[in-house]
Image (spheres, rainbow, N blue to C red):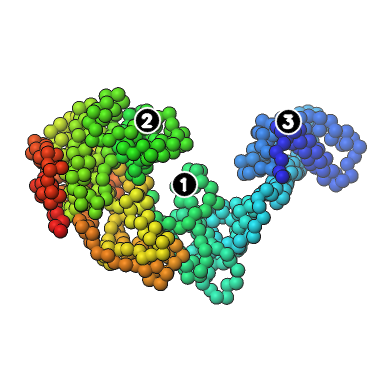
Amino acid sequence: MYVRRSPAIRLLSLTILYLVGLIASFYVAYQLRWEFRMPPHQTAAFLDNMLWVLPLKLALLYAFRQFAGLLAYFSLPDLRRLVSAMLLASGVMLGYRLFSADTTIAPPKSVILADLILSLGVLTSIRLGFRMVKERFFTGIDAPARRTRRVAIIGAGDVGASLAKELLVKRKLALEPVAFFDDDKSKWRSRIHDVPVLGAPETLLNPELNLQLDEAIIAMPRASAKRIGEVVALLQRSRLKFETVPALDQLATGKVKVTQLRNVEIEDLLGRDPVQLEMENIRHILRGKIVMVTGAGGSIGSELCRQIAEFNPSRLLMVEQSEVQIFQIEQEMIERGAGAIVQPLVADILDSARMRQIFERFQPQVIFHAAAHKHVPMMESQPSEAIKNNSIGTARLAELALEHGVERFVLISTDKAINPTNVMGASKRLAEIFIQSLHSKNPSKTKFMAVRFGNVLGSSGSVVPTFKKQIAAGGPVRVTHPDVTRYFMTIPEAVALVLQSGAQGSGGEIFVLDMGKPVKIVDLARQLIELSGLRPDEDIEIEFVGLRPGEKLYEELSHKGENITPTTHPKIMRFVAEPEPFDRVCKLLEEMNQELHHSEPMQLKMMLKKAVPEYHPYVT
């Protein structure tokens, strides 16, 4: 077992090693000057000079923190400090030599130069020697013995090189890099950490290549989703098990290490360019503010909490109806170091008394309203719940925000609110109409706005977890229609753009996020099956079950009467429509509220159509 020594023992060990190395370097430098036939009088000069040169060098090594590092750890910053210390010591000796009348007070210039080179070489060798011994004999010594697997690294850039270095050092991982593959031709037939770069990833399919690989690691965090998909396809053809390194943004923050490998996820194949945010604008509306997030335990709400906390609000109010979900996000925020600012609040936005109490006690300044019912078929069969929660709940919350002087109110909406064919989308559209009309009536107070986006990968309502469960059960994977398409975003990207929209809104707008290209759901199902190591239609059957009530073949980006204007951010568009008269909207909401539990579903849908003319109810 590798034992770490106490600081005192480490300091004594380093002092002795440095003294031995410095004395040897200084002595050899003198001998080189006189070709190893040093005259007796120069021996005396050597001893006299050593009495002040050695303390000087040790003092400088201490000043440059060369005694603070562990013996077995030596990196480029350590080397830079070591070089600086030795250069300064040589400079002092040279100064004495040049400006002193007594030529014996300092070594000859040739000795100073030779001593500098030898000292650097000896001290660096000492530190590197301890590092090599640790890495060779002690790293992973306590790990249980297991067969070392031979791996290929796809990607010979900085990330791939770092991965190879870590794998070579950390033997406990039992992964031996034997080859690199990269698209950059200039790297072919070269070596990185003594591991050869054999060619493009397609070279793996060469039958003459006999590397006896056990698996491959994709280390291409900057590659396009299309290229990642191509690499995954060829790895599947080669029947190799494969994993990938963490995302680039995770590596950049230092939160994860390059060796924390994971399975390739559908997000990697549907990936989009990283979102560039105008950080100062977002920081301006969040820093030092009391921010409320409703639906804080959900997929979008919890990510809002994570990202908002990074902008240092004075208080983060997390409102959630489910105590299980609010507990989970609270614990996560505490682990992230945000425990001092988070305030978990179990509350139903429809409970007016409870919400009023929260407003009066905490006085929120910015609200992100993510609480909603989102399941399309479920809301289609019980429209009263969609209207009550999504429309009436939003209206009550918005009125409370106006009453208590909230600065900004951001409604998280959906692309299904555009020319809706289902109750869920229509109820969210009615919520948009209400906050627009409320802002129009009170333009100088709270800034109300909505942000629409499509499906988010990894959310509780996404098709991805449903498909994964069906694949795990052996199939079939049930797809509604062979031509059905949807827009997809990752949760972090959607939330980042929500924050950006909230920062640039002046009130009354509906922002729509650039959702990229639509994805065929059947293609998504096939990719998920392949990522599971299975073959579509052979190992796992895909079954088409028909569109469910209220579902469209494709989602739309805008509806008639909305004017599209660009914003300062390339991935955000602004839609501006003429607001409805506030009194009329309030009257329609009140009529629906009175009839929620007294009318048949179809009657409620027709009432909803009266409030949202572009809504086309699904008729059974």
Q: Position of residue 18 (x, y in %)?
A: 76, 37
Of 319 and 126, which appears nearest the observer? Answer: 319
Taking the image as shown, residue 349 lies to the left or right of residue 11, namely: left
Of 364 and 220, which appears nearest the observer? Answer: 364
Q: Quadrant of residue 96?
A: top right
Q: Residue at x 23, y 62 (%)?
A: 547
The label number, if any, that marks residue 476 in the structure image:
none
Q: Position of residue 319 (x, y in %)?
A: 32, 35
Circle 1: element type: helix
**N-term mark: 3 or 2:** 3
Q: How many marks?
A: 3
Q: Which residue is mark 1?
A: 250
Q: Is residue 287 visible?
A: no
Residue 528 vertical placement versus 401 (above, below) = below
> Nearer the observer, disc 3 or disc 2?
2
Q: Which residue is mark 3?
A: 8
**N-term mark: 1 or 3:** 3
Q: Which residue is mark 2?
A: 343
Q: Quadrant of residue 293?
A: top left
1 and 3 marks in contact (CB < 8 Å): no
